[in-house]
Amino acid sequence: MEPVITVGLDGSPESLSAARWAADEAGRRGCALRLLHAWPTLVPEPVKVPSEADQNYWAKRMVDSARAELRGLHPDLAVAGDLVADDAQEALLRAASESAMTVLGSRGLELVESYFLGDISMAVAAHARGPVVLVRAEGPRSELVDTGDVVVALKLRGPCDDLLAFAFATAAARNVPLRAVHGQSPPLHAYLPWGVDHEVADDITRDARERLDHTLRPWREKYPRVEVADGIGLRSPARAVLRSAAGAGLLVVGRRRHHRVPAPRLGPVAQAAIHHARCPVAVVPHE
């Protein structure tokens, strides 16, 4: 069965940007594309009724228009439209369990007006079984050249194979370098009146680099054609990641599947990335 990338459509500029981004990614990965619009008031397909009597008319028009544009950009891409009479969040989570990735629009910290953005996109990113990519509205199409590096944020605590598998596969599909970033705030005793104790900083950096090298080694061997750079930031993980993501084509952050709190949630790095990063952000669940 051909893998599928699912996009949530609501007609907003952000969701249309998400659809274009997802079409590009589907072409690179050899996936089909599914355009999903879900809303509880959609009705079963009517039989030969005029458009003015069809309650689904505007939903169909939105999906058909997006599909026509994407087929024009990617003539060989399989693009399907899907109207679902269900709660948007439930429909997206169900689709995410069947998809290679789910792509949604995002406004970051700006005002939220459409139902796919804000609470729903954040909830899907926090609960989906597979990767969720959040994409902001774009400028002119001519400016959309995905040449930026893929940046992956690593905590170096516990396994992160799913996160690295996604990041390396994406960098390989795009033929761009991968930058692995780890941020770590120095302990309180390292701070002196004039700054951070250099010896403590060197010890922290050396230890983190050894752990980072150990984590990346098997993935460098699996993807020998992917150029890999790493960076250690002696600052909060969120600040280190956001600084490294400037100019990136994609920022990849993780979410633990089994967290100590009862309900799934996004950690501070993922929250900061979604709210502040200007590039698309992929949230990848992992052990």
Image (cartoon, rainbow, N blue to C red):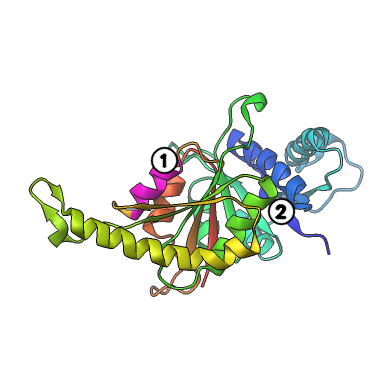
Residue appearing at x 77%, y 59% in the figure: 3
Q: Is residue 280 left or right of residue 195?
A: right
Camera-nearest residue between 20 and 152? 152
Camera-nearest residue between 136 and 178? 178
* SS for dot 1: loop
Question: Magenta part of the protein: which range?
Answer: 237-245
Q: Seen from this angle, which residue lies furthest right? A: 48
Q: Seen from this angle, which residue lies furthest left? A: 193
Which residue carries the number 2 mark? 5
Residue 183 shows which numbered tag? Answer: none
Magenta stretch encompasses residue 171? no
Which residue carries the number 1 mark? 109
User: In which quadrant of the rendered view does residue 174 lie?
Assistant: top right
Residue appearing at x 41%, y 67% in the figure: 211
Q: Position of residue 44 (x, y in %)?
A: 80, 54
Residue appearing at x 43%, y 44% in the figure: 244
Between disc 2 and disc 1, the foreground one is: 2
Secondary structure character of the magenta stretch overall: helix
Distance, label 2 to label 1, CA atoms, is 26 Å
* SS for dot 2: strand
**Residue 27 in view:** yes
Q: Is residue 103 left or right of residue 242?
A: right
Camera-nearest residue between 222 and 56? 222
Q: Position of residue 254 (x, y in %)?
A: 49, 61
Amino acid carrying label 1: it is: Leu
